[in-house]
Structures are given as C-alpha cells and as structure tokens.
Image (cartoon, rainbow, N blue to C red):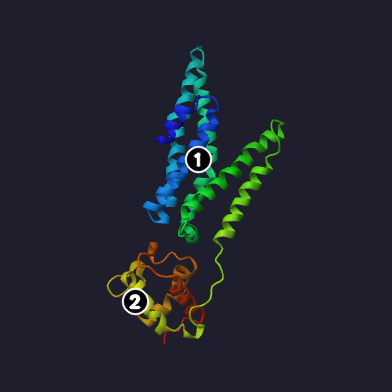
C-alpha cells in the first residue's frame, strides 16, 4: 500500500520516476531492516521478497491489465484514449522488471544459511537486492544500446557484480584457531553440547523429522546431517534457539572430521 501511494502521489510530478525510485529504495531498505529485527533471518528474507512480489502482482492486477482493457474499449468505441493508462502501465511494468531479480534472490535465500544468519543480515539482503536491480538495468538498457538510444550499459553490470563480489568477500569465514586439539574432539566432549543444544528437539521426548541424537548409535547414523546442518550451513538449531556457539560448532566439526567416534 505504501508503494502504491508513492507511485500515485509522486509519479506524475517533475522527475517523478527518479523520486519514486528513490522512495521505493528507501521503503525496501526500511522494510528489510524491520523484518530482520522482528523475525528470524530466514523468515525475514522470504517476507521481504514476498512483499515485493505482492507489489508486482498488484501492479498487474490493479493497474496494467485494467488500464489495457480501458484503452482497448476506447479504441473499439472510437473515443480518444486517455494517455494516463499507458503511463501507469509502463511505470508499473518497469518497476516489476527491476523487482524480478531481488525477488528471486529473496525466495532462494532460505537455502543458504550463511546469508540470513549473518549479524547484519538486513544489510546483506539490501546489498544483494541492489546488485540484482543493477544487473537488471544492464539487461534493460542493452536493447536500447543496440538501437542506438543510449550508451553501453556495461557499467551497471559491473556495479552489480562488484557488489556481489564485495558481499562474498565480506561473508567469507575468517581463519579460526581451534579451541581444542582435534584429538580432544571425542564423543565425551560433544555429548554435553548435543545434550544442551539438540536434545530438546532430537532426544527421548521429541524426535523432529525422526532424528534422534541422544544415543551413540543414533548419533553415528545422523553424523553427516549434524555436520551439514550445525557446522556447515549453521541452520540448526533452528534460528539458533538454544544458543549454540561458534566454538561448539567448531568442536562438532572436529569430531566429525575425526570420523565421528561414538566410543
């Protein structure tokens, strides 16, 4: 609703496209910050993408298609065509074009825990969506360049790629020093971690997704999944509800790399 109000109030003014673009960018940034502070990161990324996708659908349903129908009816009746329908349709279609890649990123982000679990996940979300919009600008202007309407848009693609590369560099894990020698990563050392962080959902009382970790045999069976979910992707515990620390994840990683001993 805020997006639609911005388009209607500022869209017809002088430099309206630039004003609307700046305000929508601000709106998305504020929504990203609020979502990442109100909800777990995984949900926040999806919710922001869903918000933008809802605006895209509303553009088509409430403005583009109805405007097109009115234009067709005017032409069929031999009446003058109100140019506002063409203006609105083009405006909303252009917005949908730039929304496409940010929405795709947000929808796919739930597979990559290192993105939405970062301490500044709201900034990660904003930067990646900005990169997607910049790359989309390259594709939009490329056709105009071939027709001689504008200069080569390679700069927009370069900016998008540079932002993505910067985020990759920023999120790359720093070298860490093991808190304990690998030889110390035994079942006896990892069991207290599992008991405190994992047994609530994967113990004797509850076995989420039929995974139980409170016995040596069961832990051995699911060792690879524990390593993948808790150490590599850091998606477990879910939303880190039990407060597993980086040192504890490193200990689990050492234990798995030793062959996941359970004796």
Check the image and report above or below for 79 versus 41: above
x, y (%) of residue 172? 56, 63
Q: Residue furthest bottom?
A: 263
Q: Position of residue 80 (x, y in %)?
A: 51, 13
Residue in the picture at 46% in, 21% down? 70
> Of the residues tagged 1 and 2, which is closer to the observer?
1
Position in image of residue 53 (x %, y %): 45, 42
Looking at this view, is 78 or 171 the one in front? Answer: 171
* Marker count (numbered): 2
Could you classify mark 1 by the number of other residues whose Cα lies within 10 Å: few (under 14), some (14-19), or many (20 or more)? some
- Decide: is 197 above or below 21: below
Q: Residue at x 55, y 34 (%)?
A: 94
Q: Which mark is residue 195?
A: 2
Q: In the shown orientation, is residue 21 left or right of residue 200?
A: right
Q: Return the residue nearer the eye: 179 or 231.
A: 179
Q: CA separation, marks 1 and 2?
A: 45 Å
Q: Are marks 1 and 2 in contact (CB under 8 Å)?
A: no
Task: Please state if 60 lies on the left or on the right of 210 as rendered.
Answer: right
Q: Residue at x 52, y 46 (%)?
A: 102
Among the 4 quarters of the image, the one containing residue 218: bottom left
Report helix, strand or loop for mark 2. Answer: helix
| Image height of 147 relative to 183, above or below | above
Q: Nearer the viewer, residue 68 or 260?
A: 260
Q: Nearer the viewer, residue 221 or 181?
A: 181
- The disc label shown at residue 181, or none: none
Please tell me whether mark 1 sits on a helix, a strand or a loop.
helix
> Which residue reaches farthest left?
205
Q: Earlier in the sequence, mark 1 or mark 2?
A: 1
Q: Residues within 10 Å of mark 2 (few under 14, many from 20)?
A: some
- Residue occupied by mark 1: 25
User: Is the C terminus in the top left, top right, bottom left or bottom right quadrant?
Assistant: bottom left
């Amino acid at each position: 609703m805020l997006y639609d109000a911005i388009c209607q109030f500022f869209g017809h003014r002088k430099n309206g496209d630039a004003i609307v673009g700046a305000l929508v960018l601000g709106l998305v940034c504020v929504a990203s910050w609020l979502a990442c502070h109100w909800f777990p990161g995984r949900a926040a990324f999806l919710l922001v993408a869903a918000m933008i996708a809802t605006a895209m659908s509303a553009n088509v349903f409430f403005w583009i298609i109805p405007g097109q129908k009115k234009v067709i009816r005017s032409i069929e009746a031999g009446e003058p065509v109100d140019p506002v329908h063409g203006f609105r349709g083009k405006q909303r279609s252009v917005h949908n074009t730039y929304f496409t890649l940010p929405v795709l990123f947000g929808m796919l982000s739930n597979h990559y825990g290192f993105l939405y679990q970062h301490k500044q996940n709201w900034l990660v979300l904003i930067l990646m969506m900005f990169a997607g919009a910049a790359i989309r600008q390259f594709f939009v202007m490329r056709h105009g360049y071939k027709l001689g309407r504008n200069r080569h848009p390679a700069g927009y693609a370069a900016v998008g790629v540079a932002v993505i590369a910067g985020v990759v560099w920023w999120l790359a894990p720093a070298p860490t020093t093991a808190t304990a020698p690998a030889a110390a990563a035994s079942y006896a050392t990892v069991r207290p971690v599992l008991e405190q962080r994992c047994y609530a959902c994967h113990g004797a009382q509850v076995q989420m997704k039929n995974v139980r970790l409170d016995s040596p045999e069961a832990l051995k069976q699911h060792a690879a999944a524990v390593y993948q979910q808790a150490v590599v992707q850091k998606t477990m515990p879910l939303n880190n509800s039990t407060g597993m620390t980086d040192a504890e994840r490193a200990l689990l990683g050492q234990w798995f790399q030793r062959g996941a001993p359970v004796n």
